[in-house]
Image (cartoon, rainbow, N blue to C red):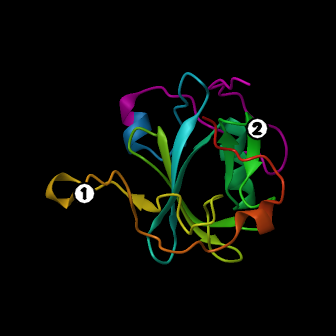
């Protein structure tokens, strides 16, 4: 499903409206929310833990996901692999409650600071963060290792949480 950057006004009491992008000054210096969605109708979203500041995940939002996140205060994303709107934690119980949402200078990226329900994990693999491996650089590369695990233990067992649900990772 391809989303567009339609700037029409949504209806309803909890409606969120996005301003049309009229000028650089308006986008960068004024208090109007005028997000810039890419050609696929998506905006990048970096999500961090509200307490530790650790990066939990990088995801994407379409217009509906951004609106629902603003209205509900819980994180919604667009799953590029499954092509569906995704309420983070709806299956796992690891709901991300948004403490703060920011948008960058040219309004083409979102940053969420969240508190995660349950174990606090955000990664479907079972780790706290989706960024559980480090890529060694320069002299830090030992024995040709490509990746080093920085989280030594999973926070939860994905089989217990997701059962036989299909893995969202696509090859």
Residue 84 numbered mark, or none: 2
Residue at the image point whose x is 71% and y is 28% from the top: 8
**Dividing the picture into quarters, in which one does residue 99 lie?**
bottom right
User: SS at mark 1?
Assistant: loop
Magenta residues, as a range? 1-25
User: SS at mark 2?
Assistant: strand
From the image, give the main secondary structure of the stretch colored magenta. loop
Return the residue found at the far left: 139
Coordinates of residue 48 in the picture (x, y in percent):
50, 63
Q: Is residue 3 magenta?
A: yes
In the shown orientation, is residue 81 left or right of residue 159? left
Q: Is residue 22 magenta?
A: yes
Which quadrant, please, contains the C terminus? top right
Q: Which residue is mark 1?
A: 143
Viewer-side residue, 57 vs 130: 130
**First of labels 1, 2 by sequence position:** 2
Coordinates of residue 53 in the picture (x, y in percent):
44, 70
């Amino acid at each position: 499903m391809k989303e567009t950057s339609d700037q029409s006004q949504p209806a309803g009491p909890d409606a969120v409206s996005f301003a049309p992008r009229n000028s650089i000054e308006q986008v960068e210096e004024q208090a109007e929310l005028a997000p810039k969605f890419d050609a696929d109708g998506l905006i990048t979203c970096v999500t961090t833990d509200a307490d530790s500041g650790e990066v939990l995940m990088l995801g994407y939002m379409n217009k509906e996901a951004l609106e629902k996140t603003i209205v509900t205060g819980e994180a919604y994303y667009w799953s590029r692999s499954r092509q569906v709107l995704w309420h983070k934690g709806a299956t796992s119980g690891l709901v991300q409650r948004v403490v703060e949402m920011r948008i960058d200078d040219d309004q083409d990226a979102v940053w969420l600071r969240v508190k995660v329900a349950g174990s606090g994990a955000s990664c479907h693999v079972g780790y706290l963060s989706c960024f559980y491996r480090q890529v060694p650089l320069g002299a830090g590369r030992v024995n040709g290792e490509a990746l080093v695990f920085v989280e030594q233990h999973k926070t939860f067992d994905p089989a217990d949480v997701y059962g036989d649900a299909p893995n969202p990772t696509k090859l």
